[in-house]
Image (tube, rainbow, N blue to C red):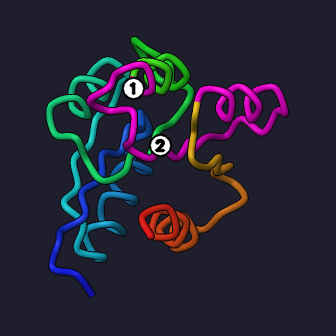
Amino acid sequence: MSDQINSIVIVEDDVFLRRLYELKFKEQKFDVKVAEDGQAGLELIRATKPSVVLLDIELPKLDGFAVLQALKQDEATRQIPVLMLTNSSTQASIDQARSLGAADYIIKAHFLPSEVVAKVWACLK
């Protein structure tokens, strides 16, 4: 077990879900930062360079695809794993996220918060 603290930025506009995931990751000793819209999320990720990002697609100001694309085009943030966390289960959305470089695609309704945490841990290994 390393002493390195994992950091996560959660970009989610739903207050309930944002707080829920924030608590779940704090329980796992993550340094958690949150943003409620895509623009704020992008700025926060660029400023803090977290270990991993949990990113919703349907967001105010800038959608998750635009945030993901900006992160993957930037040398400073390209290597950060981004897990899309969304209600959109369309194949087109899944394909778009993968083509833009998402590490994983998690459909909110299909996974418990504990399973989302497990997927993030798997991404960090």
Rendered location of residue 115, percent (x, y): 58, 71
Q: Is residue 98 above or below residue 117?
A: above
Q: Is residue 76 above or below residue 34?
A: above
Q: Is residue 101 above or below residue 21?
A: above
Q: Around disc 2, counting alpha carbons within 10 Å, would you say few (fewer than 14), some (14 to 19), or many (20 or more)? A: many
Which residue does the numbered mark 2 point to in the structure image?
Answer: 82
Rendered location of residue 61, percent (x, y): 39, 11
Residue range highlighted in magenta: 71-100
**Dot 2 and dot 1 residues touching (CB under 8 Å):** yes
Residue at screen point 34% across, 21% down:
74
Left/right placement of residue 54 relative to residue 8 reads: right
Which residue does the numbered mark 1 point to in the structure image?
Answer: 71
Left/right placement of residue 46 relative to residue 73 reads: left
Rendered location of residue 99, percent (x, y): 68, 28
Q: Secondary structure at mark 1?
A: helix
- Give the residue type at disc 2: Val
Front position in the image: 116 or 73: 73
Report the disc number at residue 62: none
Distance of mark 2 from mark 1, alpha carbons? 9 Å
Quadrant of the rendered structure where residue 109 is?
bottom right
